[in-house]
């Protein structure tokens, strides 16, 4: 018989816990994965993303073997003893993939449930209340690598990031006073003192929520037109 048909495998399968993760963190899964790769997340959220990636991989395995079983049961292949063997083998593999998926779900829940509890009982923290769009942009620039330099002739201090973004020194002072950024003073400032985010700084980025649609985003009414009826949800 021909070899097992190759099936496409997606980068990330949608898991049954995606909606709970997004509700607890305030970010969609793709954003969380990107923040994990950039080192922005704090330890609990980093652990959550790592376990979710394992779950996504396990979900992909279930999808693969389920699709393969469906294909084997179609009219594409002749019905013979070899087909029955392949179907039996695929059923066993599907059971194993399902067991691995269920175990991955439990590992995600172990990490997710404390985050959900903290989100339900949390009150606005000092970092979450003070963070602004400018703060967020500066923290995102610093997390990729940044150093504080002092010009040898003028004595002027400036922050240069790995992405080439300049962070004003006044902004750095504000982030330091808020406890979002720490400075490695073991290096001479003329050679560059590395900057890094504190746990509070990472938490401030993690706590930022997606903006809700505002009334300004709604289409404007034409002058003299009757007010439109509220949209009906399907």
Image: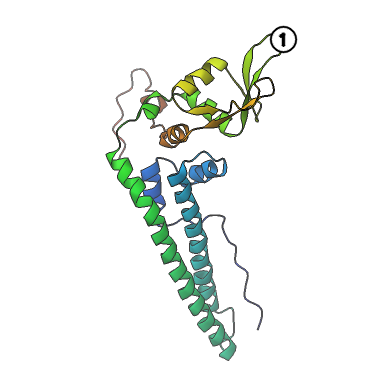
Q: Residue furthest front?
A: 186
Of 32 and 233, nearer the camera is: 32
How far across and how far down the image is residue 127, in percent? 40, 28
Of 22 and 219, nearer the camera is: 22
Whether residue 36 appears in this view of the structure is yes
Question: For residue 39, what is the image quadrant?
Answer: top right
Which colour style is shown? rainbow
How busy is the neighbourhood of tag 1: few (under 14 within 10 Å), some, or many (20 plus)?
Answer: few
Quadrant where the N terminus is found in the figure: bottom right
Q: Where 125 falls versus 2 (above or below)? A: above
Horizontally, is 219 left or right of 144 in the view? Answer: left
Q: Residue furthest top?
A: 154
The residue beneath circle 1 is 153
How far across and how far down the image is residue 187, in percent? 64, 26
Question: Could you tell me which residue is drawn at 33 percent across and 18 percent down?
Answer: 224
Q: Residue furthest right?
A: 153
Whether residue 214 appears in this view of the structure is no
How far across and how far down the image is residue 48, in percent? 44, 50
Question: Could you tell me which residue is drawn at 58 percent across and 61 percent down?
Answer: 9
Q: Count how many numbered circles sit on residues in the image.
A: 1
Q: Where 185 falls versus 42 (above or below)? A: above
Of 174 and 82, nearer the camera is: 174
Of 196 and 19, nearer the camera is: 196
Q: Where 73 falls versus 133 (above or below)? A: below
How far across and how far down the image is residue 168, in percent? 57, 17
Horizontally, is 106 left or right of 46 in the view? Answer: left
Element marked by disc 1: loop
């Amino acid at each position: 018989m021909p070899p097992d048909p190759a099936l496409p495998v997606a980068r990330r399968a949608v898991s049954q816990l995606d909606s709970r993760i997004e509700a607890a963190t305030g970010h969609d899964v793709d954003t969380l994965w990107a923040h994990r790769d950039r080192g922005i997340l704090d330890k609990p959220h980093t652990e959550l993303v790592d376990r979710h990636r394992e779950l996504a991989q396990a979900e992909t395995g279930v999808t693969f073997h389920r699709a393969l079983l469906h294909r084997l049961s179609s009219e594409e292949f002749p019905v013979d003893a070899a087909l029955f063997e392949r179907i039996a083998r695929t059923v066993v593999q599907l059971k194993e993939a399902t067991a691995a998926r269920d175990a991955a779900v439990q590992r995600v829940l172990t990490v997710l449930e404390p985050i959900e509890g903290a989100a339900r009982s949390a009150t606005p923290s000092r970092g979450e209340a003070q963070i602004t769009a400018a703060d967020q942009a500066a923290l995102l620039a610093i997390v990729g690598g940044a150093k504080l330099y002092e010009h040898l002739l003028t004595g002027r201090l400036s922050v240069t990031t790995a992405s080439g973004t300049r962070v004003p020194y006044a902004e750095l002072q504000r982030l330091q006073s808020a406890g979002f950024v720490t400075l490695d003073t073991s290096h001479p400032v003329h050679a560059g003192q590395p900057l890094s985010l504190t746990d509070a700084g990472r938490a401030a980025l993690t706590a930022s929520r997606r903006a809700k649609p505002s009334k300004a985003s709604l289409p404007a009414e034409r002058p003299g037109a009757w007010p439109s009826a509220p949209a009906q949800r399907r």
